[in-house]
Amino acid sequence: MELASKVLKGDVGAAARLIRCIEDELPEAAGELEKIYPHTGKASIVGVAGAPGAGKSTLIDSLVSIFRKQGMTVGVVAVDPTSPFTGGAILGDRIRMQQHNTDKGVFIRSLATRGWKGGLAKATVNAVHVMDAMGKDIIFVEAVGSGQAEVDVAKVADTALLVLTPGMGDEIQMLKAGILEAADIFVINKADREGTDNLKRALEVMIDMKAGAPTEWKPAIVLTEAVYGKGAEELVEQINKHREFLTSSGELEKRRKIRAELELAWAVESAAMNYVERMEKGYLERLVADLAQRKMNPHSAAQEIINRCVKF
Ligand SMILES: Nc1nc2c(ncn2[C@@H]2O[C@H](COP(=O)(O)OP(=O)(O)OP(=O)(O)O)[C@@H](O)[C@H]2O)c(=O)[nH]1
Ligand SMILES: [Mg+2]
């Protein structure tokens, strides 16, 4: 049996293998993803972004336990930018979430980013599709933030959490507006530490400043102490509340359309690039050399590729 059919039956080994294919950008992945796509779109996707060490994994671990008690099946995709600084993070995540290892209702996978051509968000979306197709009810996406990663995770998720820690009170103004705007729920983790009140106040001011119409979602702030399991119940309440807002307001539909549009753009791009790679040897290199020497511009080069695609 092919991977896709096994994944649809919830086969853990097949799902792990397909995610590995996605990670390695193997051409086989595309065909399998095509088959599972009609069966996706059912899971709730919760993005968890934040600086290294903010407590994302510890927090997800608590959330997984609570959602499991509510009878939901859970998937976790931990995106790990492979860098010398966070080399140990994958192992850390595994250890931190170990208590769920023997639970068949939980599927956890780390994606190591290694300079993907397709980009972080694309591989993440595809890994989420796999877990969605397996029948997981809720899927967490953990991403270590370097600014753009946080925004990317927000694009992937229905509900975007941003995990902050005390001591950032003064720095909040310095965070990129895009990062703050992308969050539906702000989590102040390590709330046992000094500076929690300052950070909370800074966030409240910022949220009030950009307050929209009463019908819009007002980002929530939840204080947690993930290592002690404190605040996790309230966070689950907020996640569920945001979920209800998404469905009742029509926002879920909107976000899913934005994601579908993004996926379409990726697909067009990779279809064109696949075509280019199958063209006569050296064609792409020649175009690139012409661009570098300004004999050609990127727009005309793309147009030329499209024209050849159409004739093909
Ligand atoms: N004091 C305190 N420490 C915490 C709290 N939550 C997590 N930690 C600790 O913070 C450290 C980092 O936690 P992780 O859950 O690995 O953080 P992370 O954001 O997943 O880290 P990366 O995946 O490496 O980015 C661990 O040593 C935790 O025990 C908290 O509420 N209070
Ligand atoms: Mg982590």
Image: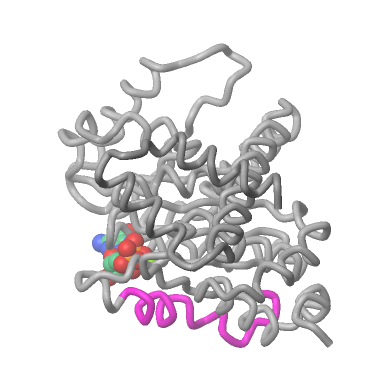
- Which residue extends farthest top? 213
Taking the spot 38% from the left edge, 77% from the top edge, the residue there is 90
- Is 136 left, or right, of 93 in this rendering? right
Scheme of colours in the image: one colour
In the foreground, 198 or 215: 215
- Is 14 left, or right, of 9 in this rendering? left
Residue 72 seen in this snapshot: no
- The image quarter containing residue 298 is top left
Residue 218 vertical placement versus 61 (above, below) = above
- The image quarter containing residue 206 is top left
Q: Position of residue 55 (x, y in %)?
A: 34, 61
Residue 93 seen in this snapshot: yes
Residue 257 vertical placement versus 153 (above, below) = above
Task: Give the number of marks.
Answer: 0
Judge whether residue 101 is colored magenta: yes
Quarter of the picture containing the N terminus is bottom right
Dominant secondary structure (helix, strand or loop) of the stretch shown in magenta: helix
Q: Position of residue 300 (x, y in %)?
A: 46, 35
Q: Which residues are magenta?
A: 89-105
Judge whether residue 168 is colored magenta: no
Residue 112 vertical placement versus 273 (above, below) = below
Taking the spot 28% from the left edge, 62% from the top edge, the residue there is 53
In the foreground, 182 or 263: 263
- Is 164 left, or right, of 273 in this rendering? left
Taking the spot 35% from the left edge, 45% from the top edge, the residue there is 148
In the foreground, 220 or 211: 211
Q: Position of residue 272 (x, y in %)?
A: 59, 52
- The image quarter containing residue 278 is bottom right
In the foreground, 167 or 158: 158
Taking the spot 77% from the left edge, 66% from the top edge, the residue there is 135
